[in-house]
Image (spheres, grey):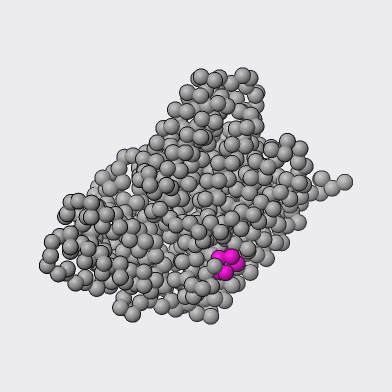
Amino acid sequence: MSWQAFWLASFVVAFAAFGGISLLIAVRGVAEIRELFTALDEEQRRKRP
Amino acid sequence: MSAAGIVSPFSLLDALITLASLVATLWIGLRVKRYVGSIEDYLVANRGMGLYVGAASLLSTEVGIITYMYQAQFGFVAGFSAFVTGLITLGVCLVVGRTGFVITRLRELEILTVPEYFEKRYGRPVRVLAGLLMAFGGSLNLGIFPIIEARFLAIVTGIPSAYLGWTMAGLLLLALVYTAVGGMVSLIVTNYVQYVFLAAGTLIVTVACLRATGWGAMVGAVRSHLGGHGFDPVQDLGWGFLLWQVLLWVALMTVWQSVAMRTFSTRDPATGKKMFTLTGFLFLGRAIIPMAWGIAALAFFWGRAEPAAPPAPATRTAQIEQVEARLDAGFRRDLDEGRIGRLLPQLEQLERLAGSERGPAATRAAERAQERRGEIGLLAMPWMLAATLPSGLLGLMVAGMLAASISTYAGYFLGWSSIIAQDIVAPLAGGELSGAARLRLTRVTVVLLTVFIMIWSLVYDLPGPAYFYLQVTANLFMAPTLIAVVGGLYWRRASATGAVLAFVLGAVTSLGYLVPALKLGVATAGNLSWALAITGFVAGSLLVPARARPAEARP
């Protein structure tokens, strides 16, 4: 494989992976933030006298 | 186009899109303040971060306008060979993610900062020394962000340079407000929103670059205009540089404070490992995508090049002086007005003449030409965006870039201020500070750090490409930190004397690069720093062994 083909393949993988994982993060991140807030709320309730 | 210069089409619509994104970020950042009750909430979000939000937080902290600019600059000057650093990053992330090398052990110790481990393993003086060097190197590193990013914003928005300082001060203030108030909880939530903007901006710019030039033109520009370089990284960058990159990225992915804080914030060590595997591919994009923008800018401006007039017949040295004088005469103005298509042929002419002649004058001319290429490379990408993106898309791109930058400032403010408060001030105060006092101290440190960065950014002149400056200031403490952490975790004989020697020798050698009079190459300074830090660590540990080993931190 020539350097040119190798760098083109690297760019395609980088671009596709960045786009794909970003979409995954955008979709699944919302639920995780809700879980984080719930956990922090529970923690604060537990600490309250 | 190049004779008239480039004028950004940034419009009211673009300004409104940008403003809306900033207001949304600030509003979200401030709303989560009520969740911050303790120093653990503030620094590591009570260790409740999930996989996808963790990946978003890590990436948006490690990607700012400056990242895009220095990566594009590296692509502009080194061509496709620069891509190799992205592949190195991916490899390191995958290995760290799969093996849990260092990160799993540190996560299990439930610490808040990396130097905290040094106190457990080597004693308080090593913690303070590591904290001092980290805060020093980290602040130097962060110190050039505003001025470089201000130039990007000036080009793509058309803001007059007189208002640049105020623009950057406003952005720093925005990051400062919600970081100081909401800490890591704010960061995680705002980082998520910012990541969505950042990713959208990145994809828009990439498509715009490819539409403006095309892959074939990018390959052609590298082949024709980088003097036979640009494809083979071993030949272009050398084994020494590649080795240093591997070592540095291992350190950055394991013990760089803002990255380590994300590891410490994950729900459990297994989530931390998965986060690294996922972010490995994002880090690949973080490097290769903006480097491709830099190469696209090279192709874009060579496509608009104005041929340079040949020098008048004279001796070769006289011709070099002639061409250099002509280039110098209009360089600053042409660069500031985006007439890069006029500068590139003159620069290439100078490089060709200087390369065909021997002697000190030719060597000096070649060095100056290289500096000029670096300066053009830093600004070529934003000029290309200003010339190609239509109004509307420009606003979305700027919103994405600002989101990237503010999240980086916020992440680094929190990272370095936590080191100063937790690892320098608190231990020196006898470690008697309450949680509330530490929280206050961290917030005050965030403010002081912002002031320092604004000042440093205005007074310091870069000694070379931004990419190298940033990596050397990181290397200053990363080499000894990783060596002392790995030695502490995996080698029973590691001692405090070894750790101190590693920090001193590693830092002094890296600083050599920042002193132009020493003429120390970047790869030489980097590798020497690692070699001396390892030597000092091993020699110090063998000659002055540890007296008693603390139970929880030893191998």
User: Looking at the image, which is closer to me, B228 or B35?
Assistant: B228
User: Looking at the image, which is closer to me, B179 or A16?
Assistant: B179
User: Looking at the image, which is closer to me, B353 or B21?
Assistant: B353
Left or right of residue B312, residue B413 in this image? right
Q: Residue at the location (55% across, 65% down)? A: B168
Q: Position of residue B325 (x, y in %)?
A: 26, 67
Left or right of residue B307, residue A20 in this image? right
Q: Residue at the location (22% across, 66% down)? A: B323
Q: Position of residue B130 (x, y in %)?
A: 57, 37
How many marks the image carries: the answer is 0
Q: Quadrant of residue B326?
A: bottom left
**Residue B389 sits above or below residue B477 on the image:** below
Q: Position of residue B196 (x, y in %)?
A: 55, 61
Q: Is residue B309 visible?
A: yes
Q: Residue at the location (72% across, 39% down)? A: B429
Q: Quadrant of the C terminus of chain B?
A: top right
For the stretch drawn in magenta, the main secondary structure is helix
Q: Quadrant of the N terminus of chain B?
A: bottom left
User: Which residues lie in the magenta part?
Assistant: B166-171
Q: Position of residue B552 (x, y in %)?
A: 65, 26
**Residue B171 sits above or below residue B13 on the image:** above
